[in-house]
Amino acid sequence: MDFAFFEGKIVPVEEAKISIMTNSFHYGTAIFEGIRAYWNEEEEQLYILFAKEHYERLLTNARCLFMELNYSAEELVEITKEILRKSEIREDVYIRPIAYFKDLKLTPKLIDYTPEIAIYLYRFGRYLDTSKGIRAKVSSWRRNDDNSIPSRWKVAGAYVNSALAKTEALMSGYDEAILLNSQGYVAEGSGENIFIIKNGKAITPSPNEHILEGITRNAVITLLKKELVVEVEERPIARSELYTADEVFLTGTAAEVTPVVEIDNRKIGNGEIGPITKQLQEFYFNAVRGKIQRYKKWLTPVYDK
C-alpha cells in the first residue's frame, strides 16, 4: 500500500482527497515539484535525488504566490523519507509534492487563503526514450513570458502552455515539443531544459530566456565541465541552430538525459545518440544510483543501515 502526506498526516493514498470546490483546482494556483528516487540493488538502498534542493525551490516558489508553508525543506525531506519507508518502496519511484490553497472559495486571488502541502508517490518509469533518442517538433506555441506567468516558477496553471505544446507534438507524430520564447529564441521543451552540442561545446539557454532554472540542468552542467571537460556556454539559441547542431539533448527530473535525434524531420548529426550525450548519460545514471562516490552528496538515503 502506498502512503501520502495530506493535511499534516501520513495516510493511505486513497484517503488523500480534495474537494471539487478547492480554490487551486479551479485557478491553477498550485506550486509543485517532481523528485525522483532511485533504487540501488547492490546496496539495497533507495536514494532521493536532490531532495533538499527540490523542497527549497518549492518553498521559494510558494512564497512568490504568497503561500507561507509551516515546514522547512529539511522537515519535508524527512516526511518524504517516512512516506517511502512506510510504502516499502524498493524500486525507482517519482515523488510529487504540491502546495495549494485548500479553501473552498471561488475568487482568483493569492491572499487571505490557507496554503497546504501534499506529497504522494507515482510509479513513473521512463518519461521519454533515453535509450534510442526522440523526435521533437518546434512548437507553434510560445513559452510563457516572465511578465505573464514566470517559467522559473513551477506553477500548475502555467503547464497549460506545456500541455498545448506537447499535445501538438504528439498529434503531429513527434515525441516532444521545443518551445521558443517571445523573442523567438529557443527556450526549452514542454517539461525539460535543452542543450545543443556544436564543435565540442555545450550551449544552453540562460535563465533570462524564460526557462525553468532546472536542478537537473545544473547537475548536467557540472558533469559536462568536471567529468567530460566540455565547455558550457549559456546564451540565446536561434531556432536554426537546432538543425545544424552536432547533438541535442533534454534534461529534467522526469526526462533525465534524453537525446534528441531528429527535430522538424531533420536528423541531428547522424541521427543517432552523439558521443558526448552518451558519455553524459553514463555519468548521470551512475551518479543518481549512488555508484559514483563523489556525487553521493546529491543523494539522500531512505533506509537506515
Image (cartoon, rainbow, N blue to C red):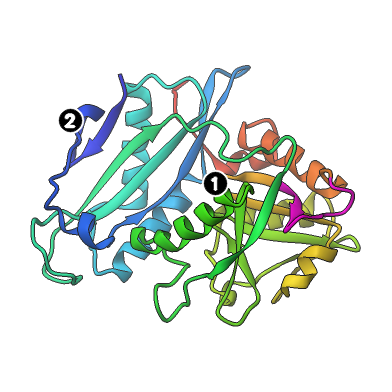
Within the image, what quadrant is residue 121 found in?
A: top left
Asked if residue 231 shows in the view, the reply is no
Label 1: few (<14), some or many (≥20) within 10 Å? many
Question: Which mark is on residue 290?
Answer: none
Image coordinates of residue 274 in percent, x first then y, are 85, 47
Label 2: few (<14), some or many (≥20) within 10 Å? few
Image coordinates of residue 242 in percent, x first then y, are 76, 65
Measure how far apart labels 2 and 1 are at the Cα level.
27 Å
Point out the stretch of residues depicted in magenta.
259-271
Question: Mark 2: which secondary structure?
Answer: helix
Q: Nearer the viewer, residue 105 or 31?
A: 105
Asked if residue 79 is among those painted magenta in the image, a careful observer would answer: no
Disc 1 marks a residue whose amino acid type is Thr
Q: Which residue is mark 2?
A: 15
Disc 2 marks a residue whose amino acid type is Glu
Image coordinates of residue 304 in percent, x first then y, are 44, 23
Q: Which residue is mark 1?
A: 253
Question: Mark 1: which secondary structure?
Answer: loop
